[in-house]
Amino acid sequence: MSNRKCKCKICKKEMKVKDAFKVNNNGKNAYYCSESEYNEHIKEKQERENMIKLIRSILGYVDGMILPPILIKKINVLNKFYPSEVLSDCFDFNKDTISYWWNLEGKFSNEYGRVSYIMKIIESNINDQYIKWKNKKQIEKKNLINKNKTSIMNIDYEPKKRKSKDISSFLD
């Protein structure tokens, strides 16, 4: 086996090829630290795509229309700390307000002003959504732990039959 080195596509950690999780993408191999890290990356990527679709629908953009670059830039800044799921929840929670201000004629002189105002709405509500999301995740984790505990407790247990030391076992 070769001692070739590779880098994780996500965290950029160096490791040996034999220790890495390999994914073949269109004939090219990509390496990751573990399968769980890769799956988490794919999940986050899908959540981000769903968030962008939601934002498109709230702002009235159809597929193919380019979202304002400043909007993507501001979302990326928030996305460094807040997961895409939290951002989606925040946009969904505030969609009526966002839609109203986005479509208001004459209030903003350009798209940059509209995006800045929309992002201020998101920034002022994101911490509340993050706390709700964090609490939801903790509850899900507790439920999973409790589910595992109950499944372990439901295992049938039969004690071993002990051999009797008296004469009654011979009397049958």
Image (tube, helix red, strand yellow):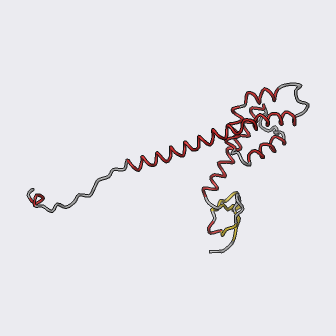
**Pick the front one: 70 or 166:** 166
Q: Quadrant of the N terminus?
A: bottom right
Quadrant (top left, top right, bottom left, bottom right) of the C terminus: bottom left
**Number of numbered discs overlaid on the protein picture:** 0
Residue that sits furthest to the left in the current view: 171
> Residue 61 placed where, x, y %?
79, 33
The one of 3 and 33 positioned closer to us in this rendering: 33
User: On the rendered structure, is 138 left or right of 85?
Assistant: left
| Residue at (17, 60) in percent of width and height | 164
Give x and y (percent) for residue 93: 69, 32
Looking at the image, which is closer to me, 24 or 12? Answer: 12
The image position of residue 4, as x and y in percent, is: 68, 72
Tell me which corner region of the image, top left, top right, bottom left or bottom right, holds residue 96: top right
> Image check: 139 left or right of 62?
left
Position of 52 with respect to 69 (left or right) is: left
In the picture, residue 88 is in which quadrant?
top right
Apparent side of residue 36 relative to residue 98 in the rendered image (left or right) = left
Q: Nearer the viewer, residue 130 or 94?
A: 130
